[in-house]
Amino acid sequence: MKLRFKFFSMVLVFTTFYADAQLGTVGTTSANSSFIRGWTDPALNHNALLKQKTADGGYTIIGNFKVKGSPFLYGLSHKGNMFSPEAKAYNINLNYNTYNQELEFTSNSNPDKPLIKEPGTIDSFTLLLDVVAGITSNLDFVYGATLGSKDKAYFQKLYEGPNYSVYKKYKSELNYVSDNYIQSELREYEMQVEYYYKSANSKGLKKVKPNAYAVTKEFKDVKDLSSIVTADDFSINTDAAFKKAFEVLNN
């Protein structure tokens, strides 16, 4: 009887996990969920490592909270380019804050004190290749309004085509610290990533879950992607799977 119950429990756990993976019950990816799914977004992984380093201190103050970790994409001080209607700046030091969507930068004219650009004052920016920090290629970001979105945030270009384009958005939230039972004011940054796509016939962006089932279903009236991208593709590298799917959609 015990053996039969144990076997049934294992089957139930496996069935639940498989169903979640196929149906994509979570539309937002965080460092924790990325670990479960098998692939960790490089920026989320970098953020998780920073939280470990600040486990014993190094807090920032936001309102009444002491917050550990970092909201900055890949940490601080990366070479980049920044573009606005008024000016263009190349090879400056950029910090992208995913919590409030602000950009901090230093240049030859302000080497000691970073200037801050609020969301929407910059049309687009690029974080340049920085292998040491984990940035393996240039990362191009564009402001939501440029893409027809009302979201006051920047979106990273994953793949842009004549008919369909796909983007990802990073954001950070303040969450409770799971192992903290003493300091009620203690919080930590949790960085998350969401995926959106835009079609040539649409005016804005539409959110799409990062799994094969959701993508195949979303575009079933355009092309059959069931043999193009699989659950394994998204588990191995979600970004690469999206690029693969959207390359086919544009051909």
Image: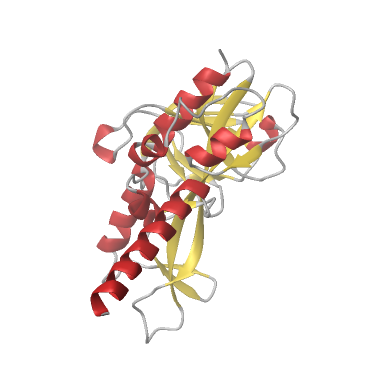
Task: In the displayed orientation, state which residue is furthest to the bottom.
Answer: 182
Could you tell me residue 251's position as x and y percent?
56, 12
Instruction: Indicate whether 188 appears above or below 158.
Output: below
Could you tell me residue 151's position as x and y percent?
67, 45
Answer whether residue 3 is visible to the viewer in this image: yes
Q: Quadrant of residue 48?
A: bottom left
Instruction: Indicate whether 146 appears above or below 160.
Output: below
Answer whether residue 121 is visible to the viewer in this image: no
Please state which of residues 191 and 200 is positioned toward the viewer in this rendering.
Answer: 200
Instruction: Indicate whether 43 appears above or below 12.
Output: above
Could you tell me residue 140's position as x and y percent?
49, 29
Please state which of residues 59 and 13 is positioned toward the viewer in this rendering.
Answer: 13
Q: Residue at x 31, y 30 (%)?
A: 136
* Quadrant of the drawing holding the N terminus: bottom left
Task: In the displayed orientation, state which residue is furthest to the front.
Answer: 1
Please state which of residues 69 and 213 is positioned toward the viewer in this rendering.
Answer: 213
Please state which of residues 27 and 18 is positioned toward the viewer in this rendering.
Answer: 18
Q: Is residue 219 left or right of residue 169?
A: right
Please say which color scheme the image uses: secondary structure
Q: Residue at x 52, y 40 (%)?
A: 213
Q: Count how many numbered circles sit on residues in the image.
A: 0
Task: In the displayed orientation, state which residue is furthest to the top.
Answer: 251
Q: Is residue 61 left or right of residue 209?
A: left
Q: Residue at x 24, y 74 (%)?
A: 3
